[in-house]
Amino acid sequence: MMNDSGRGGCRTLVVRVQGRACALPLVNVIETMRPLPIEPMAGVPAFVCGISLVRGAPTPVVDLGALLGTLNGTRTRFVTVRLGDRQVALSVSEVVGIRELDASTLQKLPPLVQRASGDVIEQIGALDAQVLAVLRAGWELPEEVWQALTPGEVA
């Protein structure tokens, strides 16, 4: 995925879930916000918290920590991401900011859903293939990569 700078990188939104840093392609991000009330739903996987009303649209809320096998614990921010003409809210511990990752760094990063169990991946795909596509487009940032990134720098 290329950014508009032409350098072959990707502008990302970096979020934290517990102690893990994750990067989502900025092109998929709609907005970040404080958590909204969540209406629980029966019969959904454990990583689906329920439904929130985001700007008038019923929006599924996915706990990114639970999805990655880490209990999120503190839900301090929602990140809404675009799924075609729909959206989903990812519940995260912290929104760190926007960072640009260069192409050589991106090639070395593990996919965001790499540590998710096969069952979780299958459940996501069964619920909504577009959610899975957006999550597969994200990356987990190993500590050494995260430490190398300062605001506005390219890794």
Image: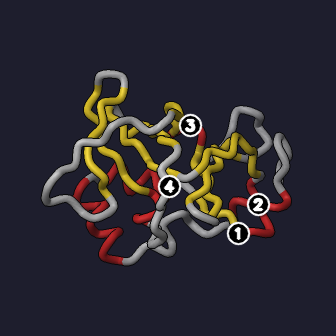
Residue picked out by circle 4:
74
User: Mark 1 or mark 4, which has the lower sequence index?
Assistant: 4
- The residue drawn where x is 60% and y is 60% is 139
Give the amino acid at mark 3: Val
Residue displayed at 70% across by 69% down: 142
In the drawing, does residue 106 fall left or right of residue 90? right
- Helix, strand or loop at label 4? It is loop
Q: Residues within 10 Å of mark 2 (few under 14, many from 20)?
A: some
Give the alpha-carbon distance from disc 4 to disc 3, as whole Å: 26 Å
Q: Which mark is residue 142?
A: 1
Instruction: Judge the density around disc 1: few (<14), some (14-19), many (≥20) Cα neighbours within 10 Å.
Output: few
Q: Distance between the Cα atoms at labels 1 and 2? A: 6 Å
The mark found on residue 146 in the picture is 2
- Disc 1 marks a residue whose amino acid type is Pro
- Closest to the observer, 47 or 125: 47
Q: Check contact, mark 1 vs mark 2: CB within 8 A.
A: yes
Which marked residue is nearer to the observer: mark 1 or mark 4? Answer: 4
